[in-house]
Image: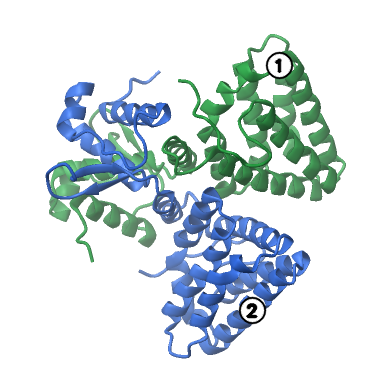
Chain colours: A blue, B green
Amino acid sequence: MVEARAWQIVLERIEQDLLSGALQPGDHLPGERALAADLGVGRSSVREALRVLEVLGLIRTASGSGPRSGAIIVALPGGGMSALMRLQVAAQGFSVDDIVQTRLILETETVSRLAGNPDNRALTVPRTLLSAMDSANLTPEEFLTLDAQFHLSLTEALGNHVLTATMAGLRSSIEAYVQSGLPGLASWPATANRLRHEHRELTDAITAGNVELARTVIHDHITDYYVETGLAERSGESVPAPAR
Amino acid sequence: MVEARAWQIVLERIEQDLLSGALQPGDHLPGERALAADLGVGRSSVREALRVLEVLGLIRTASGSGPRSGAIIVALPGGGMSALMRLQVAAQGFSVDDIVQTRLILETETVSRLAGNPDNRALTVPRTLLSAMDSANLTPEEFLTLDAQFHLSLTEALGNHVLTATMAGLRSSIEAYVQSGLPGLASWPATANRLRHEHRELTDAITAGNVELARTVIHDHITDYYVETGLAERSGESVPAPAR
């Protein structure tokens, strides 16, 4: 058994307080000095634990002094999942192909569920984003940003925060690769038109309650884009690092 | 635009070095002093960034001094996903129901793929774990540990590291809740026998290439256990915190 290091003691204490309900979302954490004294560790160890909690999306640190300063429990997982997956892709712990395959699984299930229980309100945000993407004045980067928001808005419509945070993490983990694939396209306007057309096919299939069609459209839509930009092979070969 | 804080500057630099290939898995990071001097930040900021990388499963820090000491790039995402999801469940960023629903999606897809492409080697580890679970001498906690390993071994057989790390994170995020559900069971021996039976049904369905049966068995297996222990309602109601 390895002895817990000082910063781990701080993390464990905060986790226990969250589990017991002694700490709740919206609560302020005790200050650095109080936590350090209470746990018998140095203030630098407290700060290290707070950084970890911040990156994982557990706390937000406010600047300034007074009762409104210090760290607040927020429990917003999206940023933490994105940081983790992005860094793991950068460090080759996750391959781009494995990210894309996992995205395919979750997004196919997403559109299946939406089409299986058609509800026009669920498509309000996605349709607004599609209208925005019809503009001819968008740069490829702007278009791709809206595109990512469109896909995420479909998962958000299901109301499962774990799915949403995971999808956000998967997408942002390969953001640099998606952007770096642009120069490899034969014609951006042609690709943009194809993407617009496929997005409408998808929302129409969902509205019509056609589960099988929605599954086929999303699968081909995602796979074709990664193949077209040279980011992934259907055979699952590895992918070069993006230019930075 | 918020100015990046010192520890974020360190994180971004390491991410860039990973993306460019200047840092690779197995490489040692520069020492604290060198990183601090190079980036013009304090050593405490470097240490904060290193803790973040350690919790996210990017580096392992070795103790001692000399050329073998310091932080090594490891890129092992499982622990990071578990820490993130466990803390988000504790802080109510993720609900137990959303975790269970996401687990159902990924595990149903896992057994579909295994049954769709039956390969007896894929089931070697899962079957070994099932044999271990036949022992009458296991405590409920030991049984549940093997049970978790069995389920994870099915996903591992697919060879997708993103799926595996996500499944490991989902399962460990509700570990405390799973164990706390034990006293709510009418009879542990009866539950254990039912779980053993369902596990065999599942591996038999996979071996037989029966995708539909494998999907049904895994769905009912997971759902029934959470309902039986009072951890989840089929209706998706919220779940009380576990005793600690």
The quadrant the N terminus of chain A occupies is top left
Does B46 appear above or below A167? above
The answer to which of B71 and A207 lies nearer the viewer is A207
Image coordinates of residue B55 in percent, x first then y, are 37, 39
Which residue is labeled 1 in the image? B186
The answer to which of B21 and B131 lies nearer the viewer is B131
* Residue at (21, 38) in percent of width and height: A47
Residue B94 lies left or right of residue A50; in this view the side is right
Q: Residues within 10 Å of mark 2 (few under 14, many from 20)?
A: few
> Which amino acid, by three-letter code, is at mark 2?
Arg
Which disc, if any, is residue A200? 2
Q: Please tell me whether mark 1 sits on a helix, a strand or a loop.
A: loop
Does B135 appear above or below A85? above
Chain name for mark 2: A
* Residue at (63, 28) in percent of width and height: B230
In this view of the protein, can residue A242 be seen by the observer? Answer: yes
| Mark count | 2
Residue B34 lies left or right of residue B203; in this view the side is left
